[in-house]
Structure formats: C-alpha cells, structure tokens
C-alpha cells in the first residue's frame, strides 16, 4: 500500500488528477507515504514543495494540502523535495529524491538526471523501476520551517474604478490589470 492505496488505485488517482501517470508524481506518492510515517495525519500540517513540476500534484492528490486552501506553498528552487510540517510548531520533515540512492536504480537515476532521452526509456519500464525502488531512493530529515511557513491572510478588497472588478487593495489604485500589468488584453 502506498498512501493507503493499492498500486492500481494509486495509478488511477494519479491519472485522474494529473491527466496521465507521470513518473515524478509517482515518486511524489512514495515521498508523501514516507512523510506520513514520520508525521501523524492527525497533525494540522502544511506543505512546502520545492519545484513546480509534478510534486505539487502529488501533494494535492495525497494530502489535504492544496494551493487553493493555502496549506501548500511552492518555492520553485528546482529541487525534488517536499516538507510537511505542523502549522503550529513549524516542525516537520523534509523528504527528497536522493541522487546517490537513486544510482542503485539505473532507469530511475537516468530519468531523474536526464541522461536518457524519454524515447529511449519507455514509461512502462520507468514505472516498473520506480515501483521497485519505492522509498529506497528517498532521504528524509527532521526540520523546523524558519521562513515561508506563515499563511497569507486575505487583505482588504477594493473595487477598481476603471474596470469595476474586485481586487486586493494592496495592489494600489487602479488594479494591476488596469495599471497595464495584466496578462491579457480584451478582444473587441
């Protein structure tokens, strides 16, 4: 059992949430499983994910921590690591894919380090290698979160005088989009 699921249930949950069975998300499930061996599911835990690739979806699939509820933060340090910590004490555990340990699993190591083109390492072979490796490719350490652990509270809401939409008052006047800092343009 991984994250309380059989292998087939795990694959189905990954596919349903992520759209396909990504190797990084599968490893993320093993990471979450290992974290829960060290921190109780009864603790009100928050998560910090150190990459924007695959791992945030593992956290959102296998823990109650999501971007939407504010219990997960993504610090894109481009490291394959997750910290799960008690939101009251800021103590928890950080787990990461350990390259030295992954060397014992050639296909996993070659995929992780980008040493083999995707076309030369069939997904089925890689998935089998990840299941065989399991948690043996991971390292874990106890940590205290010292930065980025605080939850951001929603501040004052204002109505933009130009577009009439609600926005965070902290953006200034008018809203960022009307200041020309938006990501879109209306098509007339």
Image (cartoon, rainbow, N blue to C red):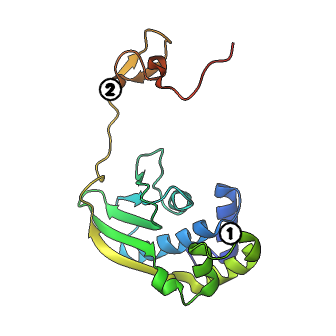
**Left or right placement of residue 131 versus residue 119 in this view:** left
Q: Earlier in the sequence, mark 2 or mark 1?
A: 1
Image: 3 above or below 151: below
Residue appearing at x 50%, y 82% in the figure: 137
Residue under label 2: 170
Q: Nearer the viewer, mark 2 or mark 1?
A: 2
**Which image quarter: residue 142?**
bottom left
Q: Bin the neighbour count of mark 2 within 10 Å (Cα to Cα): few under 14, some 14-19, many 20 and up.
A: few
Foreground of the two, 105 or 3: 105
Gap in angstroms between the C-alphas marked 2 and 1: 42 Å
Q: Residue furthest bottom?
A: 104
**Left or right placement of residue 145 versus residue 18 in this view:** left
Residue under label 1: 11
Q: Are marks 2 and 1 in contact (CB under 8 Å)?
A: no
Image: 70 above or below 40: above
Mark 2 element type = helix
Residue 12 % position (x, y)? 70, 65
Mark 1 element type = helix
């Amino acid at each position: 059992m991984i994250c309380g699921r059989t292998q087939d249930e795990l694959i189905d949950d990954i596919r349903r949430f992520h759209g396909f069975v990504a190797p990084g998300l599968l490893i993320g499930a093993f990471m979450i499983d290992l974290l829960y061996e060290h921190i109780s599911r009864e603790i009100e835990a928050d998560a910090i994910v150190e990459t924007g690739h695959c791992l945030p979806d593992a956290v959102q699939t296998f823990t109650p921590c999501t971007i939407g509820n504010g219990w997960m933060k993504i610090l894109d340090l481009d490291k394959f690591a997750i910290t799960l910590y008690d939101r009251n004490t800021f103590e928890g555990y950080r787990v990461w894919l350990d390259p030295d340990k992954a060397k014992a699993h050639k296909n996993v190591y070659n995929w992780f380090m980008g040493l083999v083109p995707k076309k030369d390492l069939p997904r089925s072979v890689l998935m089998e290698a990840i299941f065989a490796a399991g948690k043996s490719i991971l390292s874990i350490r106890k940590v205290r979160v010292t930065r980025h652990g605080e939850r951001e509270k929603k501040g004052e809401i204002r109505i933009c005088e130009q577009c009439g939409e609600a926005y965070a008052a902290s953006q200034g006047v008018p809203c960022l989009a009307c200041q020309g800092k938006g990501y879109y343009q209306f098509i007339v």
